[in-house]
Amino acid sequence: MSLRIRPMTISDLDHVLAIAETAVTAPRWPRESYQEAIGPGSRRIALVAEQDGLVAGFAVMSILPPQAELESIAVASRWLRHGVATALLQDLMEAARWGEATELLLEVRASNRAAAELYARAGFLEVGRRPGYYADPVEDAVILRLGLWKSRVQL
Ligand SMILES: CC(C)(COP(=O)(O)OP(=O)(O)OC[C@H]1O[C@@H](n2cnc3c(N)ncnc32)[C@H](O)[C@@H]1OP(=O)(O)O)[C@@H](O)C(=O)NCCC(=O)NCCS
């Protein structure tokens, strides 16, 4: 088993959309949003994780220094709990530092336990809530923050 993190390309998009489709707690982005994210002049970093040559997960982050925002991260069901999201997160943190961001922020559904555990383990802390932010079902968004100069991810 070999895990490789690399930039997302156009030819990944069918796989990325398929993963996002099955990961019900991932944001529903249309193909055009991913195309924009990987297109020229984008302020976003979009990565995929490859397991044995197949797309196992992906993540998208925007950078507007001093902040970076994790906008989407999802892993194919076959590869859950294999460290794929942790590896994506680690590379995004590195990219955010290179982009001169000093903090990484994200919003997550209050009930998303898998994501909450992932982020807690990476060192994110809750800094606020947006009541009723999500629809279908209506739910609070928890705002999490990671200071990039003191971050840690345990593999
Ligand atoms: C959240 C998600 C991205 C995690 O991906 P993953 O590749 O399985 O995560 P990792 O294997 O890197 O897990 C790292 C740690 O996070 C925690 N974790 C991950 N999934 C978990 C779960 N279902 N329950 C409890 N803890 C979990 C564990 O501490 C895990 O370490 P361990 O496996 O050694 O116990 C994945 O569950 C997913 O795609 N969910 C649907 C999309 C989504 O909700 N995205 C986040 C939106 S904000």
Image: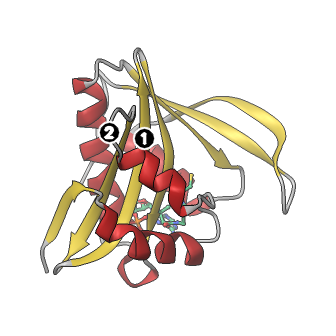
- From mark 2 to mark 1, how far is it between C-alphas? 15 Å
Q: Position of residue 108 (x, y in %)?
A: 63, 47
**Residue at the outermost bottom position:** 78
The kind of residue on which mark 1 rests is: Met
Element type at mark 1: strand
Q: Which mark is residue 40?
A: 2
* On-image quarter of the C terminus: bottom left
Observer able to see residue 153: no
Q: What colour scheme was applied to this rendering of the protein?
A: secondary structure
Residue 63 spot, x, y in % from top left: 41, 28
In front: 144, or 10?
10
Q: Quadrant of residue 25?
A: bottom right
User: Residue placed farthest to the top in the image?
Assistant: 66
Instruction: Please state the horizontal and vertical placement of residue 133, each as a whole percent of the image.
Output: 81, 42
Looking at mark 2, is its residue's CB closer than 8 Å to ligand 1? no
Q: Which residue is mark 1?
A: 61
Residue 12 image position (x, y, % from top left): 33, 69
Mark 2 lies on a secondary structure that is loop
Sequence-wise, which precedes: disc 2 or disc 1?
2
Front residue (pair 35, 105): 35
Q: Nearer the viewer, residue 11 or 45?
A: 11
Q: Residues within 10 Å of mark 2 (few under 14, many from 20)?
A: few
